[in-house]
Image (cartoon, rainbow, N blue to C red):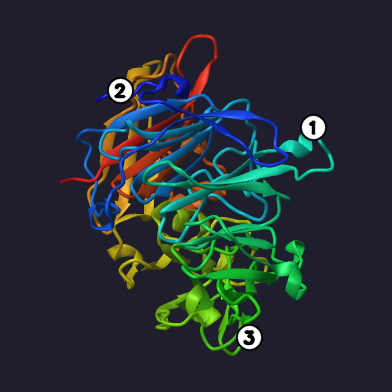
Amino acid sequence: MPVVGLTALVLIPPLVLIAVIVPGLRYEPVTQSTAADIKTNGLPSRPTSLSPDDVWHQDFDNLLDVTSGAAGPVVLAEEGVVGLDPADGTRRWSYHRQDATYLSVPEASGIALYGVDYFRPPQSQYLITSPDERYIALRVDGPGRVMPQTPPCVTIVLDAVTGEVVSEHLSDGGPLQLTDSAVLDGTIAYELDKGAKLWDLKAIGIKAESIRYSGTAGHSSFVLGFTHESDSDTGFSHGTLTLAPQDAPSQQRQSPPLMLEVDQEHLVVIAGWTVAIKGGGPSDLSGSPTEGWQAQALSLDAMAGVAGADTHAHDLGAGYGIGDAASRSSGRLALLSSPTPWQGSYAGYSPSQEWCAATTVSAVFDPRSRTVTGASDTPGLAAGAVGLSHGQPDDAEGDHVVIRPGGGASQITFPLDPPPAEPMTIDDGYNPDLKEINTAVRGQADITGASTPGATLVIIIGVPIDHQSHATMRIYGLPAPP
């Protein structure tokens, strides 16, 4: 298994030293290496099958976030942002800002590390991606830390293929969204190709605190408002968006009622699409907690009235909500089945209890191919599982990573290599029973997976690398089979 060592970003050749100057911002040198551009038709796609051949790994002392870039995985650790080659895990590009403190984004939930590190709240997402995954936005602590009358942070947008900075500006730290060509930072929108300010929502009476959503937006539309509610008895959550085309923020439209994450009030958007309740609302006439509600996938652009948007509604069947972890890990929208009633009746059901059903995912929508599949027919991680298997007692070299993909594909197993310095206690956090990703992450798992262009990842927290209780966060990458 090839080993990709984690060296300091400042030592990676070739280096480009850049002094980034933003008006009113203290000087923070940036060390950056960039990669060659790749034409759209040459970019990798998400794997449709898995192979244990050519598995690579990377170890990180403090992994903050992992997401999908158009050319492969993108990782944020305390030392900076790194774009990885999905074929072998080597670094395509890197961005390191001296003495930077990276900030999580409010009202956002992460793609791969959601719920994994229970020392952080589940909303701890640091990297925001555009629907086409070409751009990634992040924030660093800004001049407000030492100059209270100035904005508290700086927003940076990187090209996920080359690693180049395409936008950088002071920020008040409000909601953060990306379309394919613009960034909404608080109430101000900037275009990415020229960096020019497009508009400020304050001019039309919209405040940042009313937006209540950060994350991927539509390909050409923004979320300008988000209201939601949850039934305390059933855990069923639904919400409504206010949307507008990015070139006409005053032309706002309301979305139909949308399904949200089960037990939560998180909006889940994958590649500019989300899930709506078919028929207009979660009334008893259209569904129930035991039967679910009819759902359909809709694009944000269509709901916003963007000219030329794909307005087709893709029926998903009955469901109870969106699997946030399953959706973000797979890069697809995963609809969850209604929970099986406990003790044969709905009375006394607690939404915090695990579902009795053998599978939690009922249907999966791929927004890139516009296809709907059942859980048993969907390859990859949407209805799959990742975990660690026990080796022999006191034998660290006997531990293995296990991936059970969906779609009836064969289970994949490979050794935990290099082996831990000390035997690991493989408890429920490492999912030895191979519960589905969505169920495992809800139970605070220390292992999860992510499907990215060119590679499937397994992320493990707490791998001992020495005998002084020094543990690491490890990423394994399984390149897409040729």
Between the residue at mark 1 and the residue at mark 3, the CA separation in whole angstroms equals: 52 Å
Residue under numbered circle 3: 283
Quarter occupied by the N terminus: top left
Between the residue at mark 2 and the residue at mark 1, the CA separation in whole angstroms equals: 41 Å
Query: Could you say which is closer to the camera, residue 248 or residue 389?
Result: 248
Other-residue count near label 1 (Cα within 10 Å), few / some / many at <14 / 14–19 / ≥20:
few
Q: Give the number of the mark in front: 1 or 3.
A: 1
> Along the horizontal axis of the image, is 278 left or right of 124?
left
> Along the horizontal axis of the image, is 84 left or right of 217?
left
**What x and y, as percent, mark residue 229?**
70, 71
Name the residue at 76% across, 62% down: 209
Looking at numbered disc 1 in the image, what kind of residue is underneath it?
Answer: Val
Location of residue 316 with respect to 45 vertically, above or below? below
Q: Is residue 459 visible?
A: yes
Q: Earlier in the sequence, mark 3 or mark 2?
A: 2
Looking at numbered disc 2 in the image, what kind of residue is underneath it?
Answer: Val
Location of residue 356 with respect to 84 vertically, above or below? below
Looking at numbered disc 3 in the image, what kind of residue is underneath it?
Answer: Ser
> Along the horizontal axis of the image, is 169 left or right of 202?
left
Q: Give the number of the mark in front: 2 or 1.
A: 1
Residue under numbered circle 1: 146
Between the residue at mark 3 and the residue at mark 2, the CA separation in whole angstroms equals: 55 Å
Residue under numbered circle 2: 3
- The secondary element bearing badge 1 is classed as loop
Q: Within the image, what quadrant is residue 99 found in? A: top right
**What x and y, as percent, mark residue 450?**
40, 47
